[in-house]
Image: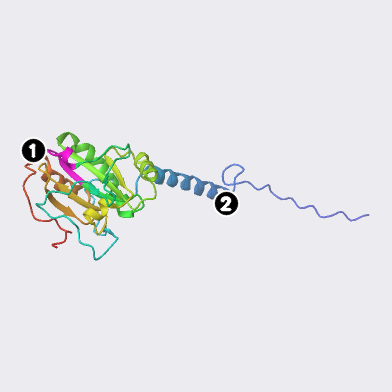
Amino acid sequence: MTERPTFTHRRERHGLVGPFGGRQIAVGLIAVLALAVGLLIVTRPLGSVEPGVDDPRATQFVLDPNAKIGVRPGQIAPELEVPLEDGTTYRLTDLDGNVVRLADLRGKGVWLNFWASWCPPCQAETPVLRDLSERYEDEGLVVVGISVQETTAGDVGRYAERYQLGYTIAPDLSGHIYRLYRPPGLPTQIFIGPDGAVRSFVLAPLTESAAIAQIEAILPEAGGGRVESPSPGTSPE
């Protein structure tokens, strides 16, 4: 009699969930998580948007450690224009091409914010400016974000559109206003009272609570024409 081959019965393998194995499920979960993180990144500026969160590590992106800011408390803030050697005048304009003049903002509290779209501490601070500019607009606050060292105004405009920034954004592509005010780094904050005089400056990104303290000191109804000492983070000279 011919010997028959040995018959071995093997049980059919099943995945952890239906036909899917553990490795396939793990890969799927990682893909979903990566997509969720990606959506979060593209829809929010860097940094926390929670109120009252103080980060002691938040520091200025230093451009020139030897620079001394060109304004002092009590001084009338220089107009946002510079005469050029060819006899013309450079005037700062917003993203729509409108001239931005401090003289037109007299009677308001003005927050000048020197920043850049590529600057990490500026990115982290973006939600603070966006939210507080909306909150205090009806109380007489005007926020002017002066963007420096950018490649094109289009880059700045796309950043403003992406994060829905409703306050005035003015690209200083030539650097004339940057050199006029001489901020040593980014961001640099300059707070101007309704009388046009500099009230204080801060050489660091601001948390919401710190920004509110500065804003409420320059609002028209708060007697913003008074001159006070420089804020923490300022240079005495």
Q: Where does the image place residue 161, in percent across and percent down from the top left?
A: 36, 39
Where does the magenta region start and end? Answer: 102-111
As drawn, 20 above or below 96:
below
- 109 sits left or right of 25 in the view: left
* Residue beneath the point at 47% across and 45% down: 35
- Which residue was labeled with disc 1? 221
Name the quarter where the C terminus is drawn. bottom left
* Residue beneath the point at 13% across and 39% down: 106
Q: Where does the image place residue 104, in percent across and percent down from the top left?
A: 17, 37
* Residue beneath the point at 65% across and 48% down: 13
Q: CA distance from mark 1 to mark 2?
A: 64 Å
Question: The disc labelled 1 sits on which kind of residue?
Answer: Glu
- Label 1 crowd (10 A; few <14 / some 14-19 / many >=20): some
The answer to the question of whether label 1 and label 2 lie on touching residues, with beta carbons closer than 8 A, is no
User: Of callouts 1 and 2, which one flags the residue occurring earlier in the amino acid sequence?
Assistant: 2
Question: Can residue 60 be found in the magenta stretch?
Answer: no
- Which residue was labeled with disc 2? 23
